[in-house]
Image: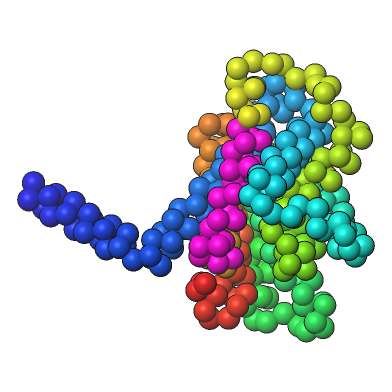
Amino acid sequence: MNHIVYSLLTLATGYLHIMNSSKQRETLIGSLLAILAATAWGVSGNFSQLVFESYNVNLEWLVTIRLLISGLILLIFSQISGRKIFALWKDRRTALRLGTFGVIGMLGVQYTYLAAIAASNAATATILQYLGPLFITAYYAAKYKRLPTRIEATAVILAMLGTALLVTHGDLKTLAISNKALILGLASAVTLAIYSIIPVPLLKNNDSTVVLGWGMIIGGIIISLFKSPFSSEAVWTFTSIASIGFIVLIGSLFAFFAYLTAVRFIGPTKASLLACAEPLSASFVAVLWMDVKFDTSDWIGATLIICTILILSYNSNGTKAVEK
């Protein structure tokens, strides 16, 4: 009993010491928010799989309402907070980049990711999407006309091996998922890279919530031309409504706010490292709740892909990449 009491007192003392430091408090809060955001994204993917499989929710309809509702709330919040939400539209080049971000970046990554879930499962789609940093690395290598470093080359090899194990269950002679699911998963990784690269100039001079809000609205308007948000063939029950509410409010709004706050507190590198909780949470929830079968080769493949993200994130700003 004395050992237990001593341990509890030690933990409490450590916690109070952390909370007494403003910088350490921000680091703790930022780290927790980054993990919560990533977990919300991962769990949201499983809710998407649920409504696709069990409640006849249309893919295009879900993308439409997710983008329009989230984007509208983000812009309203930005306006109330005193941000200039229409300033981006005054410059033609800025407006063109914003439109490109909304259509190719935001709509592209949302649609391909959810389509990959519909074609396979949330865990596989999320892990494949996390190949995105590889395409970002390749883009900047080509842009600056340089060969990949040894660390980047190692990351590429790990990613390729991890992907091969994930999509074949370790039997390299056959695919364990459909060709459609593999293509959509890789497309999701490519659009994630585009989503990350296109808005960089926009974020230098504009608030991130405004850029995200307009990106969502633009993407939502474009997809609504093909599927009206007021027309749905879904089976409406308490579970389906709650699941869609989670996808829109928790998996989109809360996750984005939490992640952006985390970036402000601990910096983009630390936040992106902690975002590795997304494929992990998606995988664990898929296995435990959605009855998705993950064998040893799948877990090894997922781990190799996550290691790729850690390597690239750590290497992005040199040896001090994990510092703000």
From what the image shows, is residue 66 above or below residue 206? above
Q: Position of residue 189 (x, y in %)?
A: 74, 55
Q: How is the image coloured?
A: rainbow
From what the image shows, is residue 147 above or below residue 296? below
| Total numbered badges shown on the rendered structure | 0
Give the camera-side residue of 238 and 276: 238
Give the camera-side residue of 16 and 268: 16
Q: Is residue 261 magenta?
A: yes
Q: Is residue 59 visible?
A: no
Image point (40%, 67%), residue name: 23
Image point (74%, 40%), residue name: 72
Q: Position of residue 89 (x, y in %)?
A: 86, 56
Q: Would residue 87 appear left or right of 150 to someone viewing this image? A: right
Q: Is residue 222 visible?
A: yes
In the displayed orientation, state which residue is furthest to the left: 2
Image point (61%, 59%), residue name: 305
Give the camera-side residue of 281 and 67: 67
From what the image shows, is residue 213 above or below residue 45? below
What kind of secondary structure does the magenta stretch mostly adopt?
helix
Q: Position of residue 136 (x, y in %)?
A: 74, 67
Give the camera-side residue of 319 and 123: 319
Q: Is residue 290 magenta?
A: no
Residue segment shown in magenta = 246-268
